[in-house]
Structures are given as structure tokens and as C-alpha cells.
Image (spheres, helix red, strand yellow):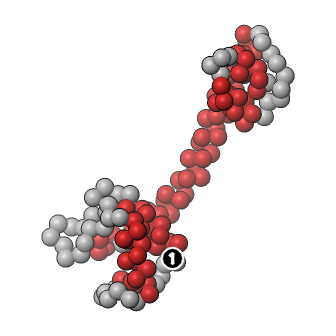
């Protein structure tokens, strides 16, 4: 039926229609009647929407996890890395990812002097520090 969907829209069907039909698990049977084409297209779009929702649902926990990690930084560096105006602590939102990752790892290793950052950074894995650096780099300054 994947080919049926493509033939229903040919020549504009293309890869997307064929892929949506494949995701729906349809066989290779050709059906050219208008009602069956409409049904095939409806199921194909539903399958495509379901697969996109599954991808979005998988990405959501990662985003929430990163926000939870970043929330630990809010006490000093402000919400989403925006320090309060006039604060002695830097805003880290929008800083370059590589710079942030290097600094966080230096705090963790104890090679960069600090008051509390060395203790805080030791509580994170290098992977978590990289993820935090990427997250704060992606925030608007």
C-alpha cells in the first residue's frame, strides 16, 4: 500500500508519502480507487504524525532533565543563566559552549580558583557539565 499512496499522489507523492506508508506498516498492494487512496493518505498522515509525536516525546525528558540540572545554577547565576543586574556573579546565558565547558571542568579539577564552584562542579559528571555548557550557550544573553 506504500506504493499505492505514492501512486495516488504521483508525481508529487515522493519520499515523504512512501515513508509514511512504510511507517504505517502497509504492504506493497496497489489500490488505485479514489476511496482507497483517500484512506491510504489519511492513515499515512496519521502514521507520520504519530512518529513525529514519538520523537518529540523522547526529546521532552532530555529537555526537562537539562532544565533541572540548570536550575541548580539559578541561585547564583539567575534563572536560565541571567544574573541579577549589578550582581558580582556573571550571567552565563549565551556564553560560548566550549568556554563554559572548559571553565566548568577546570572548577571540577580544582585548577580554577573559586569559592563554591569547585565543590558544586565535582557533583557532576563531565557529560553533565558538557550538557550544561551547551544548554546555557543556547540561552539568549
Q: Is residue 125 left or right of residue 31?
A: left
Which residue is found at the position 29% from the left and 74% from the top? 76
Estimate the x, y position of residue 119 in percent, counting from the top left.
Answer: 40, 87
Q: What's the residue at 56%, 47% (across, down)?
A: 56
Q: Residue at x 31, y 55 (%)?
A: 140
Q: Position of residue 63 (x, y in %)?
A: 49, 57
Residue 122: give x, y in percent of width and height: 46, 84
User: Mark 1 sits on what residue?
Assistant: 126
Classify residue 1 by image quadrant: top right
Q: Residues within 10 Å of mark 1 (few under 14, many from 20)?
A: some
Picture quarter with the C terminus: bottom left
Nearer the observer, 30 or 99: 99
Question: Residue 128 location, x and y as percent?
Answer: 50, 72
Q: Is residue 19 depicted above or below 141 in this figure?
A: above
Residue 68 at least partly seen = no
Give the vertical position of 81 relative to 106 (above or below).
above
Hey, which quadrant is residue 2 in on the image?
top right
53 or 3, which is in the foreground? 3
In the image, residue 76 above or below residue 28: below
The residue drawn where x is 49% and y is 78% is 124
Q: Secondary structure at mark 1?
A: helix
Amino acid at each position: 500500500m506504500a506504493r499505492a499512496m505514492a501512486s495516488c499522489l504521483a508525481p508529487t507523492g515522493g519520499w515523504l508519502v512512501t515513508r509514511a506508508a512504510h511507517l504505517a506498516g502497509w504492504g506493497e498492494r496497489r489500490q488505485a480507487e479514489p476511496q482507497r487512496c483517500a484512506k491510504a493518505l489519511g492513515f499515512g498522515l496519521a502514521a507520520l504524525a504519530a512518529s513525529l509525536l514519538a520523537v518529540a516525546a523522547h526529546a521532552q525528558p532530555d529537555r526537562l532533565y537539562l532544565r533541572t540540572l540548570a536550575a541548580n545554577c539559578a541561585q547564583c547565576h539567575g534563572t536560565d543563566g541571567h544574573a541579577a543586574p549589578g550582581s558580582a556573579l556573571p550571567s552565563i546565558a549565551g556564553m560560548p559552549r566550549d568556554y563554559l565547558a572548559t571553565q566548568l571542568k577546570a572548577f571540577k579539577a580544582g585548577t580554577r580558583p573559586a569559592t563554591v564552584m569547585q565543590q558544586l562542579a565535582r557533583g557532576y559528571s563531565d557529560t553533565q557539565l558538557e550538557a550544561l555548557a551547551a544548554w546555557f550557550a543556547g540561552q539568549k544573553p
